Amino acid sequence: MNESLDSRQVKAFVALARTGSYTETARQLYVTHSAISHAMKALEEQLGCRLFYKLGKKITLTEAGEALLHHSVRALEEMRRARATLGELKKWGARRLRLAVDALLFGNILNAALVRFHGKMPDVAMQVEFCKAGEAATLLENNQVDLVFTERFTTPDRFEFIPLLTDSFQFVVGFGHPLAGKSNVPRDQAGKYPCVLLRDSGYTRKRLDYSLSRRGFRLNFAGEIESVEMIKHLVRETNAISFLPGWIVTPELKQQTMSLLPLPHNPPQRTWGLAHLPGHPLNHVEATLLKLCQDELKKTTRRMIK
């Protein structure tokens, strides 16, 4: 049996299984006794098995009928939920935004863009979740989200990627650190201080390690931390050093609580942007968010230059 079941027959079947009466089922569904009888006969012929038998005046389910009832109830409930979801979307203007964001990018840039987005499009139902670079591709391919803001994938051919920001890694130290004020970090001094790094994707970490190794740096590695704010606190309050993009510490540079020590000669970089499936062109809602993100990035760049 390859043909799908008629939803009206399934609804009638569930009602008859619950009432045990053709007359009562017909009354509940506002049809005739004959209509219910014919519908059940057609359903049994389609399935090739008996679904009911009579026990006195009561209609009772066979074993096959009990199995069908289990699946039918679930199917009708899913259909009910689908109608409710579509009704909500219709009420909200039939629009939604399913978005996955790298936590680093969200906390420093996208939060402001999303606030502005909600002000412009308050009727759009937003679903926003954090992800890591290694999870972004899976979320898109499984249709769990429509857009991902993340660093450029290592397999770019499978996705459309719109670049938004390219950042360079630099040493960061507290404003009172012994290395603060130097034009760069001397190789022979870098290993004297504990180095805490941002816990990141394996790909980014490998690029960073390779770049430092080429320059002859041997770091006193003290650990990895997921929280940027915790890393900045350690750098400000201790002699620890870290390695971060400059835009992340823009407020601290202005407040003169941290200093940047650039790496000479092409420091390691990464590109952040918006990714989506090739068959999913941006709609008006998504294009609006993209424009707001671009605006926020321009503001961030101007603040870094001043």
Image (spheres, rainbow, N blue to C red):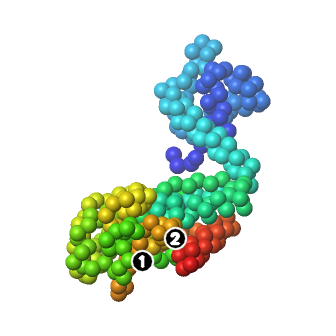
- Compared to residue 49, the image places residue 211 above or below, namely below
- Amino acid identity at mark 1: Ser
- Compared to residue 229, the image places residue 259 above or below, namely below
Q: Residue at x 61, y 30 (%)?
A: 14
**To which residue does mark 2 refer?**
254
Q: In this view, does 173 lie to the left or right of 62?
A: left
Disc nearest the viewer among 2 and 1: 2
Q: Is residue 63 left or right of residue 292?
A: left
Q: What element carries label 1?
A: strand
Q: In which quarter of the image is residue 243?
A: bottom left
C-alpha separation, residue under disc 2 versus residue under disc 1: 19 Å
Nearest the camera: 264 or 85? 264
Q: Quadrant of the C terminus?
A: bottom right
Q: In which quarter of the image is residue 262?
A: bottom left
- Specify the label residue 168 is tagged with: 1
- Amino acid identity at mark 2: Lys
